[in-house]
Amino acid sequence: QHYYITNNLRNSMICPIVFALLGTALSAVLDPSLTEWRLLTQNEERVMFPLKDYILEVKAFRPDVYNTNPSYGELFRTDKATTMMMLLQSGNWNNKVGRLVWNTIKYDKGFDVNVEECNARYQAYKSFPAGGKKEQIWAWNFNQDDVELTCDGELQYSQNFDEGEVNSRKPGLPQSCRALGNADVDRITFRHMEGYYIRGLPMDNNKGTTPPPVKLTTKKITTAKPTTKQPTTEASTTTVTPDSDDSDYDIEYPTCDCWTPECGYCTNMECTVKQDLATSDRGIQVTSKLRRKRENSIVLFDEDANEIGKFQWNLRGIWLTGCITCMTPVHLRRAKADEGQTTWSFSIKDGIVRITINGEHLYEHALIGECKERYAQAKRFAFYDMTCENTFSYSPSEMEAGERMTPDCAGTCSEQ
């Protein structure tokens, strides 16, 4: 994989390297000042940073002009104003144990993020970072078994250190991936990140951590997309009357994926269900197979069709955009069915995020401040990147389904 740099980044080759040796050279203790935002003032800076003890947050800014489908190849140079790079070192600045590259945009070909010691090629993000917003808060979370990258609280990439790719062109794989997980990273060289900010969040390795709330602003998702034109629709919905004579009965519908052209990539409100989640006791009940890698993802909207965030979770972590990033508690992981699918519920009544299985609240988190205010506006939901094999309980007594929320997802699923 070639890494080409345009002239706007070439000054990194001639400008002086700033040695920001925070803390002491003999200690991996983070400089207390780095728990607050610190501006990177050069195109290459060195910072003492114990990556196993702190989550690294990066405040980055998407460029105003960018191309999601540039030319690639040895005869082309690509504008990499979107690219960030970190070299991970252990013990001294000459002992490089890892190289991480990621971007502030999602490329059409999926050349978005790469951990050189684990991936033979670039990996694709799960969605456009921060919904296309200019200001983005990235978080690198290194655990003993894996590494996760989130943007504004939404999981974009994860890698298990025992599951590195095998590729004949990179003979070091997959052993180098496990070696990265074992490395005691105590310093980082930041490249191509001048004008961005970094800080460290203390991490409890047993329980994970919940970062302080990110300042949130509400935007129409249709205005937050890249230059590729996507279809848009009005926010009104058509109520579907279920095939039942009694509105008290729940009906099992598939978790129709809203990330499709027909659904305008989660902008078409006919692919959503209207429900006042801020006052609902039952919340959203889903039956799905719980895994370590694949997330269960629910997109939340306000009544004006603005996307306000995503709730995502799997057996490794729980995320609520901008407000929650933590490891899944052991008792919640153990509650999954021994085989097949598990029925679980997500609710957010009165600002308390809950995951419930078999009537027992196995995870709770009370939102405060801007987070509580933000998610109190949740009036609609849709499912993101979930298959037709999963189902949710449609309750006509408190839900209204959009026109495409049908037993066969408007033809995209084969009717059972």
Image (cartoon, rainbow, N blue to C red):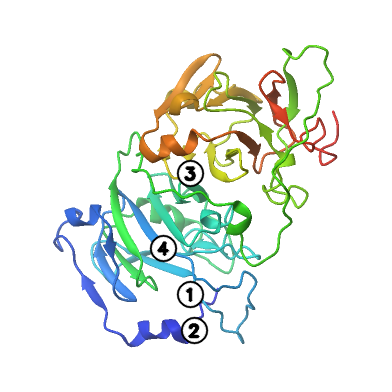
The answer to whether the residue labelled 1 contacts the one labelled 2, judged by CB atoms less than 8 Å apart, is yes
- Tag 3's secondary structure? loop
Q: Which disc number belongs to residue 60?
A: 4
State how far apart marks 3 and 1 are (Cα). Answer: 25 Å
State how far apart marks 1 and 2 are (Cα). Answer: 8 Å
Amino acid identity at mark 1: Ala
The answer to whether the residue labelled 2 contacts the one labelled 3, judged by CB atoms less than 8 Å apart, is no
Label 1 sits on residue: 81
State how far apart marks 4 and 2 are (Cα). Answer: 19 Å
Q: Earlier in the sequence, mark 1 or mark 2?
A: 2
- Tell me the crowding category of disc 3: few under 14, some 14 to 19, or many 20 or more residues within 10 angstroms, Cα based: many
Q: Earlier in the sequence, mark 4 or mark 3?
A: 4
Q: Earlier in the sequence, mark 3 or mark 1?
A: 1
Label 3 sits on residue: 321
- Tag 1's secondary structure? loop
Q: Which disc number belongs to residue 6?
A: 2
Going 28% across and 52% down the picture, which residue do you hit?
A: 200
- Tell me the crowding category of disc 2: few under 14, some 14 to 19, or many 20 or more residues within 10 angstroms, Cα based: few
State how far apart marks 4 and 3 are (Cα). Answer: 17 Å
Q: Which disc number belongs to residue 246?
A: none
Front tag of 4 and 2: 4
Task: Write down the quadrant of residue 85 in the picture.
Answer: bottom left
The answer to whether the residue labelled 4 contacts the one labelled 2, judged by CB atoms less than 8 Å apart, is no
47 relative position to 302: left or right = left
Going 58% across and 45% down the picture, which residue do you hit?
A: 307
Amino acid identity at mark 3: Thr
State how far apart marks 2 and 3 are (Cα). Answer: 33 Å
